[in-house]
Image: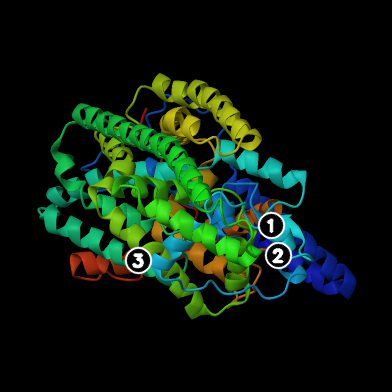
Amino acid sequence: MRADSENRIGTLTCECLPVRFRAALRFRSFLTGIAQGTLEVFHWVQGSNMSSTAAAPLTANSKTRVLGLDVIRGVAVLGILVLNIVDFGWPNEAYNNPHVLYYDPASIGPLPEKPKEDEKKKDKDAWKRMADPKPDMTRAHPSAQVRIAAVKSNYDVAEWATMGVFFADKMRTLFCILFGAGVIYLTQRTIDDGGRPLWLYYRRILILLVIGAMHAYLVWHGDILFMYAAIGLYLYPFRRFSSKTLGWISLGIFLLFVSVIWTAAAVMYQIRTRGSELEKRVLRKAEAAIASKTDESPAEFLNARGDARLAAVNSLQWADQLILRGYLGMRSSGGQRPDEITRKIRMYGEGSYFGMVKDRAKELFFMHIGMLTPLGFLSMGWLMILGMSLAKNGFFAGKWPIEWYRVWAFRVVPAAWIAEAFFILADYLWPGTGYFDMVLIVPLRQALIPTLSLGYASAIILALKGGYFTGLTWRLSHVGRMALSNYLAQSLICTFLFYSYGLGLFGQVSRVWLFVIVLCVWSLELWWSPKWLANHNFGPVEWIWRGLAYRKFPPFRKVAAPAAGTIVQPEALPA
């Protein structure tokens, strides 16, 4: 009654004031509301005890959702946008590389389309051009202004380095781990409900495979759903193993993956060494063949030299020809390709939607075929099996000893940040060091990144167990509950901002301002997720996914929504 009386008195007082004073009071009320909402989101529970046992345990066979899993999934789906935003706004080559060059599109005329060459003729021309210097792109485009993709100042380089230390690959890895944990919770819950998890699981995976393919080809080429679903095809048999056994399996697959990387590095080294020797042999033989043709015109001499080189290549055994072809391909794939980057900027910033779909299909089709093979499982499957192990031993439900979480969050994470900063600095100063990267840096980072991801998850679980930032974790849990819808929403928002059928900002926004866009999308998803779930049982895409998987659609809206103004506080995880 007292609050209602104060509101009525305030309203009457406001109506008696002049117009400009009434506007000022309303603006002050608006700012006060924003401040109160901010305090609500970042609410800090004072004097909370980290060993609190206010909530009942949330286990895999509980009807209640695992709050820790939802919050961590919410952090992952927001964090993954920090790196994806560069891929939305620039060609993929600039995704995690601050050295990529392109031409300012306004400084050059139209670029010629790529010629469609016959493969045999292409190989023949490659043999003829062996050891020739690469074309001077400045001479090809004398008026061109060369720029660095997504980098306009040192602030952009600092943003790249900072995001690389804290976010790059960590959120995607966290998603992989959570995907594996979800397999355990889904199958256990289905068994508890008396259902048959096998067919339900594979229906969900196949539907996710279709959603991922549609997202990749029709919206954005950086989709991760198809890859997760492809790897998920292999996960179901592992669910029966114990947590300890799953941990050993994960380690074994990781070591097998590292051995594949080392094998690839050894093969590349042999191709480069042997290929260089073969090229020198072919060139010596060709020079000897044309030594007597010095009196010919330059055009005739070049044709004769090309024919002599081709004849020298044909005299090699087929295995040596294959090695030489691989060597020349490796050499031509390195270096800058500003014309190709500029062509992509024009395609996505000015081109047609169907041209983009065609380009994505050409890029992704064989890659998706590869993801469906066991080799695709080898690359990321060990992370998902690690997630299955962690789900079984209670990591996400907060059942680990509190000290273990503290060690991961406050000791392991800072040490891993220092190591990651060293790797990023080395990559910036000495980019593309080749074999050294594949033999040492890549395996070390493959082990370091999951360490950081689990450290982040541990910090989140500590915050939940202690009751810290309850307003923020409440919102993050809602973002996590509709993670699939939020992930796809990010693609729709960002492609509208950057692609030609929207605002057409592709290739124009630097890294610092891209991060500002990230903050805006974060705010939007933190706001709309609780709003949506206050009136609906699932996110919109989750509702479709669930309905198709269960072959029965659940109610779209909640039968009885909470009363207006009700604030539901999140539960704390058990100690």
Callout 1 amino acid: Asp
**Which amino acid is tagged 3?**
Ala
- Between the residue at mark 1 and the residue at mark 2, the CA separation in whole angstroms equals 6 Å
Q: Which residue is mark 3?
A: 213
Return the residue at label 2.
Answer: 140
Query: Can the viewer see residue 121 in this picture?
Result: yes
Q: Seen in the image, is 145 located left or right of residue 416?
A: right
Give the CA separation, mark 3 to mark 1. Answer: 39 Å
Q: Neighbour class for label 1 at 10 Å: few (<14), some, many (≥20)?
A: few
Quarter-wise, where is residue 571 in the image? top left
At 35% across and 66% down in the image, what residue appears?
A: 213
The first of marks 3 and 1 along the sequence is 1
Q: Secondary structure at mark 2?
A: helix
Residue at 24% of width from left, 52% of height from top? 373
Circle 1/circle 2 CB separation < 8 Å: yes
Q: Which residue is mark 1?
A: 136
Q: Sequence-wise, which precedes: disc 2 or disc 3?
A: 2
Q: How many marks?
A: 3
Q: Residue 562's spot in the image, x, y percent?
A: 43, 62
The answer to whether one can see residue 570 in this image is no
Coordinates of residue 112 in the picture (x, y in percent):
61, 74
Determine the CA span between mark 2 and mark 3.
38 Å
Vertical relation: 321 (above or below) 463 = below
Q: Looking at this view, is 502 or 343 the one in front?
A: 343
